[in-house]
Amino acid sequence: MRVLGIETSCDETAAAIVDEHGEVHANVVASQVREHAPYGGVVPELASRAHLRAFVPVLERALEEGGTPDAVAVTAGPGLVGALLVGTEAAKAFAFARGLPIVGVNHLDGHLLAAHLRLPGACPQPPFPFIALLVSGGHTALYRVTAPLERELLGQTRDDAAGEAFDKAAKLLKLGYPGGPIVDRLAATGDPSAVELPRPMLHRRDDDFSFSGLKTAVARHVKAHAPFDDAALADLCASFQAAIVEVLAKKAVRACVREGVPRLVLGGGVAANRGLRARAATLAEEANVELFVPPLAACTDNAAMIAYAGTMAYARGDEGPFQVYSRDPGRVRGRFRQDGSLIAPKR
Ligand code: KG4
Ligand code: ZN
């Protein structure tokens, strides 16, 4: 079964065609980074308008490359409501015109299944269950993923997402947007022990995170020591990245050990971070945990992961009407039906 996936939840307009084995027949992503860069972050109304402009060309290219799909899957949330509406309405119109079934997919389920995509540089497909560390611009959470589309939230950030922390620190240092990749690059030449920064929530036993204090610590350091020469800037980036990475990697591996699930999957834009990949690899090996890291194109927002999650939704019999839901599942343990309502866990 070939599923057309459509993703417009944030600042990427994407369409892809994927089958139930994770083979990717088309994968088109149009980024809006240039539109939002002058503002140092995603401007929701600009995002909606850019999706409107980009959608048809992106869809046409996906269909040209991937052929005719058998069904449609679209990100129904969470995300920016205006941006989501462009994708869901366009997807419904396309499905109606072609007489195809349509299903709504939760964006987070897409990220959690991205390691299953057979893209160049893909890791082996992780067997279920696995622990997933989802780290992006909007989310930082640990999940226990028991089957495709079945996940239990173990813990999440209480304030900023990890990607948001990278972006805010980069903004403080006037490095540009998005900040994560820039900090990652500068950190490679810096000394991670040069600036002493906190390791928030590291010693707590739960799976929660907090990154807003780290941002404040960077702001204080900037106030006291700016301006920086190149070496001092690299040292600060390296120290900041090391603090975030240490907390993420340690707590993720610890969750694997505690849950008795020796498999860790990384997902989301921050999983592109070289420091995180390296540290997670070291800690996972020490704890006898197998690490699965998707290639960069599968980590950042894309429609292939939505299409693949769609194939799993059809496999279990989901189909039909859905609501756009923008709220994150929050601290609730359980999973969502395709209409956005909560299925309470059996505990
Ligand atoms: O998953 P994603 O593309 O979009 C969301 O769903 O949020 O993640 C984007 C986030 C941004 O905050 C960006 O700064 C961060 O991922 N990011 C990185 C790196 N590449 C992207 N953060 C740290 N290091 C990177 N190499
Ligand atoms: Zn995302």
Image (cartoon, grey):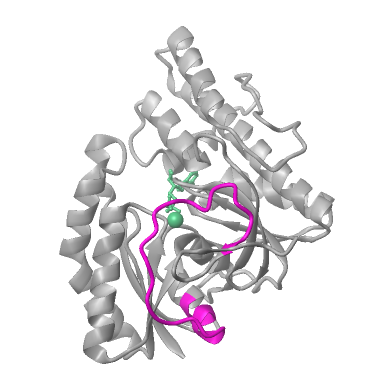
Q: Position of residue 74 (x, y in %)?
A: 37, 71
Q: Nearer the viewer, residue 279 or 200?
A: 200
Residue 155: where, in percent of width, then height?
Answer: 65, 46
Magenta segment, prevailing SS (helix, strand or loop) = loop
Residue at 37% x, 66% y is: 323
- In this rendering, position of residue 247 left or right of residue 13: right
Indicate whether residue 326 is drawn in magenta: yes
Residue visible at 47% across and 70% down?
305
Residue 11 in the image: state x and y as whole percent.
Answer: 31, 53
- The answer to whether 212 is drawn above or below residue 296 in the figure is above
Residues 141 and 302: in front is: 141
The residue located at (78%, 46%) in the rendering is 254
Foreground of the two, 141 or 119: 141
Q: Where 330 falls versus 8 (above or below)?
A: above
- Residue range in magenta is 310-335
Residue sitting at x 56%, y 83%: 316
The answer to whether residue 21 shows anywhere in this view is: yes
Residue 222 located within the stretch drawn in magenta: no
Q: Is residue 29 visible?
A: no
Residue 97 is situated, as x and y percent measured from the top left of the image, at: 21, 87
